[in-house]
């Protein structure tokens, strides 16, 4: 990845998980930013029951937002998009959608079909922090 070089053909990829505060420090030492950012269920209330963030970017330092401006961001959700919310997402983001929402094989319910709520049950990928902010502002289709 960007935090350790590109994987070479036939070699395993290097995966590092860091929070944005550590990534900000690492970006001073490295030439490039991350190859992929993941936002796990930004649509879910926190442990204290507070409302979900209307933007998962709340609290992320501006230099980090600049570092992921064109980086693919995988977003896991606990709900599947309705047909109308999927269309709204396509209209709002157009070419910023890298992968439309699909059922995740890593979900809490192992991708079981027919589930309406499932932690990390669905995933989609958008390009950059701006697309991420727009994507999570869609209404939750319950």
Image (cartoon, rainbow, N blue to C red):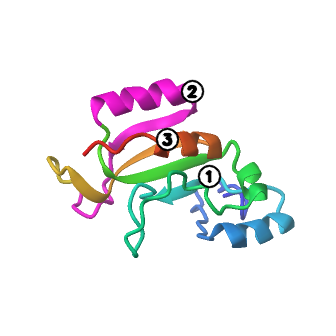
Q: Position of residue 77 (x, y in %)?
A: 37, 53
Secondary element under disc 2, as helix, strand or loop, is helix
Write down the residue under mark 3: 135
Task: State the CA–CA distance, disc 3 to disc 1.
Answer: 33 Å
Residue at 42 percent across and 67 percent down: it is 50
Task: Identify which residue, 134 or 94, lies in the foreground.
Answer: 134
Give the crowd class for mark 1: few <14, some 14-19, many >=20 residues within 10 Å: few
Write down the residue under mark 2: 95
Task: State the CA–CA distance, disc 1 to disc 2.
Answer: 29 Å
Mark closest to the chain's N terminus, 3 or 1: 1
Residue at 63 percent across and 71 percent down: it is 18
Q: Which mark is residue 9?
A: 1
Q: Position of residue 119 (x, y in %)?
A: 31, 61
| Membership of 105 in magenta stretch | yes
Task: State the CA–CA distance, disc 3 to disc 2.
Answer: 13 Å
Task: Identify which residue, 88 or 109, lies in the foreground.
Answer: 88
Whether residue 109 is situated above or below residue 25 in the rendered picture: above
Give the crowd class for mark 3: few <14, some 14-19, many >=20 residues within 10 Å: many
Secondary element under disc 3, as helix, strand or loop, is helix
Q: Position of residue 12 (x, y in %)?
A: 57, 62
* Quadrant assignment for the N terminus: bottom right
Task: Identify which residue, 15 or 59, lies in the foreground.
Answer: 59
The span shown in magenta is 82-110
């Amino acid at each position: 990845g960007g935090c350790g070089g590109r994987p070479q053909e036939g070699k395993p990829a290097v995966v590092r998980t860091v929070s944005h505060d550590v990534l900000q420090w690492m970006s001073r030492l490295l030439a490039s930013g991350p190859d992929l950012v993941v936002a796990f269920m930004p649509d879910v209330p926190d442990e204290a029951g507070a409302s979900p963030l209307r933007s998962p970017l709340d609290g992320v330092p501006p230099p980090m937002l600049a570092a992921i401006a064109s980086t693919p961001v995988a977003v896991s959700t606990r709900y599947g998009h309705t047909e109308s919310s999927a269309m709204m997402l396509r209209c709002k983001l157009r070419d910023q959608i890298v992968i439309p929402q699909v059922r995740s094989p890593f979900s809490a319910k192992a991708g079981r079909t027919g589930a309406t709520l499932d932690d990390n049950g669905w995933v989609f990928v958008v390009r950059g922090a701006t697309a991420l902010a727009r994507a999570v502002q869609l209404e939750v289709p319950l």
